[in-house]
Amino acid sequence: MEQSNSPLPFRVPAGYSGIKRSLVLAGGGMRLAYQAGVLKALEEEGLQFTHADATSGGIFNLAMLLSGLSTAEMCNNWSTVRIKDFISYLPLRKYLSPLQLPAFGDADGIARKVFPHLGISVNRIRQEERLAGTFNVCNYSWKTNEAIPHPHVQLQHLIAGVSLPMLMPALKIGADWYIDAVWIKDANLLEAVKRGAEEIWLVWAIGNQHQYQGGSFRQYVHMIEMSANGALFAEFDYINELNSRIEKGDSPYGQKQEVKVHIIKPEYPLPLDNDLYFNRINTTTLIEMGYADAKEYCINASQYPAPPSPQSTKMQEPGVAFSCRARLMGQLQDREALLHLSFSIHDVEHFVEAHHPYRLVASLSFTTADLTYYGYQGRLVVGPGAAEGTKSGRFSFRIGISGEDYFMQGSWPLHTTSTASRAVEIALHKGSSAAGELVASSCFTTTATDWRYLQKSFSFYNTRSWIEKRKAKQKLKSYFFV
């Protein structure tokens, strides 16, 4: 996708004297295609920022934003990036001395393949004039966090900022060694506060769940979660204390009103990077999830959000979970369209017993125009099918197309065997519900290739044994197809 000539997102106009607003992009690894979807929704809400800050994986997205990409371009580049390019290995001889390894791999794949594909340009970042940016990097030599202003950032800063200890080596820049700042902090709200921000929009993707899990990889993730959330909560405490001072007329950073903190996060912990690497989830779905979360937050957001606390990043506890995704092709409003649906069950047992609508995320692409629109408030309901003894999945979601609000719904017959093509009736209504005017209806199909795409996407999470996984499979099969 070529870079557009439309106004760049989130920049304030020249001479702006309104509220100072900061965008804070926290870390979360390769999964942060999620943030691109969030940014797409925030741009549609008309938000503007005087400052943006990024830590760890959030650096990918801030670097793209300051490189002059639109949010549509960011979503496109994330959806087409090759995930395996994030992983590159050291020379073989290094692995012959495992106790002396600088890390499990290196950052060559990110520097040579991922950054260029995402559209990241250090020269363009340095030239940005309308949006101040800061990139957080751990100065290991001094055990401090450095927020590098965008005019001074180097390629090595960006690479070090996403080089997680043990997985990628530290980089020497000048006399000091630098690495990912996640063990110090995973979001730098205080940088925003010190720049006078009166409103902070934090995009958070690090897990915060109740259950402590076994396994070395999971516990490595838990260490990141403890460090990241713990540092964030300390900053929450400082902001709440600062707000008490501001209320009494003591404003050391120039705020004229209390600092408000908006937090956009997933309801359940995002799948981990290894799930993305092994294609249990893909970047398209993560973008759809981020967009839906942000859109739904903005719809329900209070003008005065509650003071931030440890509860602010708390997520629901998943059980044995399942996810899948599907593609359908058809004609809509006289244009060739691709509909992508992503469905997650966060607790199979509860889903089967409750019989309630479940969340679905979606995107609609008009292939000839290279345009993609994202859905929100998506739902899937399983009920009786047209033929006796069959079931169908009825889905619906809201979607904005060319600045207009629409409601899309469809019904998918559920069968256990594949066919060359499956017909799915799609209806598009104007407005926010099926009560609106019907403006288009069409028959979308899934080809044999699309059916294989669906089958390959079937993934189970949080199963402690193959027996538990098998039971979950049987439970879902009985629910959907019997």
Image: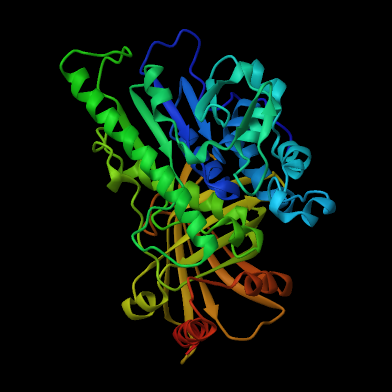
Q: How many numbered marks, from 0 up?
A: 0
Q: Nearer the viewer, residue 52 or 290?
A: 52
Drawn side of residue 277 relative to residue 373, left or right: right
Where is residue 157? Give x, y as percent: 64, 28
Residue 429 in sight in this render:
no
Q: Going by the picture, which residue comes out furthest to the top?
A: 15
Q: How far across and down, in percent of the image, does residue 166 sit?
A: 62, 48
For this rendering, which residue is in front, 238 or 71?
Answer: 238
Left or right: where 378 falls relative to 99: left
**Colour theme:** rainbow
Q: Residue at x 66, y 16 (%)?
A: 127
Viewer-proximal residue among 90 and 340: 90
Q: Is residue 242 above or below residue 271?
A: above
Question: Where, quadrant-wise, is the N terminus in this rendering?
Answer: top right
In the rendered image, which quarter is residue 209 located in?
bottom left
Residue at left 71%, top 37%? 115
**Residue 446, picture quadrant:** bottom right
Decide if residue 357 is in sight here.
Answer: yes
> Is 164 left or right of 450, judged from the image as shown?
left
Classify residue 248 as left or right of residue 199: left
Residue 472 appears at what percent x and percent y? 47, 82
Q: Residue at x 71, y 49 (%)?
A: 101
Up-down: is 225 above or below 251?
below
Q: Position of residue 135 (x, y in %)?
A: 55, 27
The correct choice, above or below, for 114 with respect to 145 in the image is: below
